[in-house]
Amino acid sequence: MTVRNTVEIGDVRITLVEELVMPTSVRWMLPDHPAPFELLDNCRSWLEPHFLNERGHILQSMHSWVIEADGMRIVVDTGIGNDKDREAEGYDGWHMRNGPYLADLAEAGSPAKKIDVVLNTHLHSDHAGWNTKWTNGHWAPTFVNARYQLVQQEWRYWDKVADSCPNIIEDSVRPLFEANVVDLVTADHRVSDSVELEPSHGHTPGHVCVRINSHGKSAIILGDVIHSPIQCAAPEQRPPLDSFIKEARIARRAFLERYADTDTIVLGSHFHTPAAGMIRRTGSTYRFDVAEA
Ligand SMILES: [Zn+2]
């Protein structure tokens, strides 16, 4: 059974639906850090037990957040997907998956056909995979009653580099245009009264976070601005995943500055469940404190 977590922000319910958990070495996560294991030890008290297992691996999660707000169901990020050729990515459990994501989504109360809007924080293979599924010999939209709101500058970038395009664009994004289910939107687009995009480019050129505001409470879905809570303690450090290293670093710093010591609940897009917490300043860096249910 899939792990879930539900967070309530005013009238809005936000539910994590997990697709895959990947235990990851801190050395891979922070390849440029001079003493990653020392850093891990220093952060152990707040990383354990949710984000660090007993073998000393950081737990990374691939998941969707489903927002129920303003009479709509909005899925943010669609994971890796089934039946997709992901040999080139090289990660365990990604290539030609046969996972229960759709059943888990339904069990969490949001079957694919009830989703009204799909948002991708960006168009990487672990965020847009379930945009489509293999149906009658072709890739068709998974969320058959949804509009897919793609950020214009993100799409333009991937569309332009199509010659060397990763499979994700061909099997999980172009078919959406062919099915005429895409609305191109700005990076500060308002999806509904309570849900809006917040520009945070760097990791990719059109990367966005998703902000939720309701009755004076707020939350923000992080996307890949920060991949692991341990980066709060070493904001200059990063896994080898950012398209634009300098811009990604600026976006990460700006995010930490903006949300540290506020009441905004940060919803990680790769943080292991419960994946929801608050950023707290400690000296010149930060920590991530899990939000108590
Ligand atoms: Zn990612």
Image (cartoon, grey):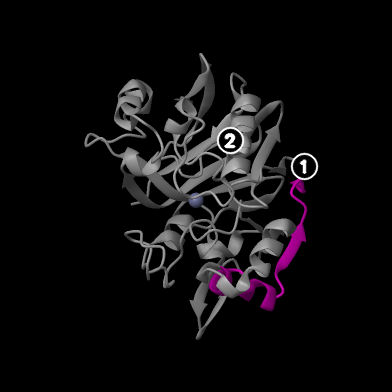
Q: Looking at the picture, which amino acid does disc 2 mark?
A: Arg
Query: Under 8 Å from ligand 1: the CB of mark 1?
Result: no
Inspect this view and state whether residue 141 appears: no
Callout 1: SS: loop
Q: Looking at the picture, which amino acid does disc 1 mark?
A: Asp
Callout 2: SS: helix
Circle nearer the viewer, 1 or 2: 2
Which residue shows up at 35% across the image and 26% down it? 39
The picture quadrant where one finds residue 159 is: bottom right
User: Is label 1 in contact with label 2 (beta carbons under 8 Å)?
Assistant: no
Which residue shows up at 66% across the image and 42% down it? 200
Which residue shows up at 34% across the image and 32% down it? 36
Label ID, residue 183: none
Residue 280, how many percent across, how many down?
53, 20
Q: Is residue 185 magenta?
A: yes
The residue that disc 2 covers is: 252
Q: In the rendered view, would you say 15 is above or below 47?
A: below
The residue that disc 1 covers is: 193
Q: Is residue 146 magenta?
A: no
Give, as a single range, the part of the protein colored magenta: 169-192
Residue 195, how many percent across, how many down?
71, 43
Q: In the rendered view, would you say 197 is above or below 179?
A: above
Q: In the rendered view, would you say 202 is above or below 101?
A: above
